[in-house]
Every structure is written in C-alpha cells, then in structure tokens.
C-alpha cells in the first residue's frame, strides 16, 4: 500500500463511516497535527497523517466499540499492523493498549489537544488560530467547566509520554493547525 496515493482512499473510508461535519473537521485537524509532528521528528509524514485522519474511524457508527471496530475495518481494508495498533493505542484508556512508538504517543496526545485548541479558538471573537497564544489556551485549561468533553489528563499524560512540556506541545499544535484553519471551520 503506497500511502501518498492512498490518502484519497483513506478519506473515502473515513467518509463512508463519518458524516458529521464536526467529526470530519476533527479528523482533518488531527491529520494536520500528525503531519506537523512527523516532519518535526523526521518521520513519515504520509503515514502519520493518514493515521491521524483515520484515528476516529468508528466513532460515529460504533461509539460503544470505539477503537475496536476501527481495528477490524482497517484490517479488512488492508492497512498494516502499525495502523491497527495506533488506533488501539490512541484509545489507551478504553483498549488497554499502551502507546509505545513515537507515532502512537503523538496520536494519543494530539487527538485531545487539537480538540481543546479548536474549542478555545471557537470562543474567541476572531474564531481564529492566527491570533491564538499559548497563554489563552492555558487560561481556558484552568477553567474545568470549559470543554468538559476534552480529557485534560490524557493530554498531560501524553506530554509526559513524549517527554515534552505541555506549553511546547500547545505551541506546536497551534502552529500545525494554523494553515488548516478554514478546513477545520475556524477563522473568518
């Protein structure tokens, strides 16, 4: 399977199982963040991007079997074992599959982090990432009533797994998402 040409097939697979615009935008955000972190680490950008794109493949149709059903669909579609393991590891708290590789640890962390950063941007007057600063994200982080659906413990644990300070991961993720702003429903 050549990943560069299979990004379209990955999008088709994702779109076949996810129709809500919010979920598709989240998939694009995680894909963009994964590509950014792959470039930064000198890793395979296409591999990491497609893993990010497909990470919540089963969320809409089988939320009660999240990560488990995605693994089945990916295997059936011929994706390699590292894809399947990454899907399972991003749901460590559900599956018990602990993230081991840099790819898995990054996906585990940026899945929740992209959601939180997007939520922060949406409540700003500009609804933009272009003027979003780490300090604004940290301020909202402290407000436990804000974006309750985002598991801050997962992000914190992910930062620890990666051995990176939370502030640095926030800054890198904002930078990763800025070029995608329009695609993920932010900005003017």
Image (spheres, grey):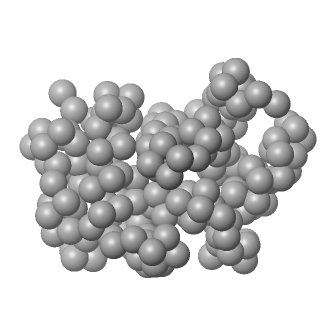
* Residue 119 visible to the viewer: no
- Which image quadrant is residue 164 in? bottom left
| Residue at x 53% of width, y 47% of height | 42
| Quadrant in the picture for the N terminus | top right
Residue 120 vertical position relative to residue 75 in the rendered view, above or below: below
The C terminus - image quarter: top left
Query: Residue 2 location, x and y as percent?
Result: 76, 28
Say left or right for 166 vs 106. Answer: left
Can the viewer see residue 180?
yes
Q: Quadrant of residue 182?
A: top left
Q: Position of residue 112 (x, y in %)?
A: 45, 61
Q: Is 107 rendered above or below residue 12? A: below
Identify the residue at image location x=21%, y=74%. Answer: 143
Q: Is residue 6 above or below residue 96?
A: above
Task: Find residue 142 and report its image quarter.
Answer: bottom left
Indicate the position of residue 63 as horizontal and vertical percent values: 66, 57
């Amino acid at each position: 399977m050549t990943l560069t040409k299979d990004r379209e097939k990955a999008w088709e697979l994702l779109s076949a199982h996810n129709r809500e615009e919010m979920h598709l935008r989240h998939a694009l955000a995680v894909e963009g963040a994964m590509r950014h972190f792959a470039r930064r680490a000198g890793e395979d950008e296409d591999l990491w991007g497609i893993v990010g794109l497909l990470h919540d493949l089963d969320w809409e149709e089988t939320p009660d079997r999240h990560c488990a059903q995605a693994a089945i669909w990916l295997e059936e579609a011929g994706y390699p074992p590292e894809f399947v393991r990454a899907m399972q590891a991003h749901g460590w708290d559900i599956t018990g599959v602990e993230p081991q590789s840099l790819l898995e640890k990054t996906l585990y962390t940026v899945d929740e982090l992209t959601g939180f950063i997007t939520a922060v941007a949406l409540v700003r007057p500009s609804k933009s990432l272009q003027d979003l600063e780490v300090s604004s994200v940290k301020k909202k982080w402290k407000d436990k009533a804000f974006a309750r659906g985002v598991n801050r413990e997962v992000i914190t644990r992910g930062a620890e797994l990666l051995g990176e300070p939370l502030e640095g991961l926030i800054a890198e993720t904002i930078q990763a998402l800025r070029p995608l702003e329009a695609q993920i429903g932010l900005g003017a």
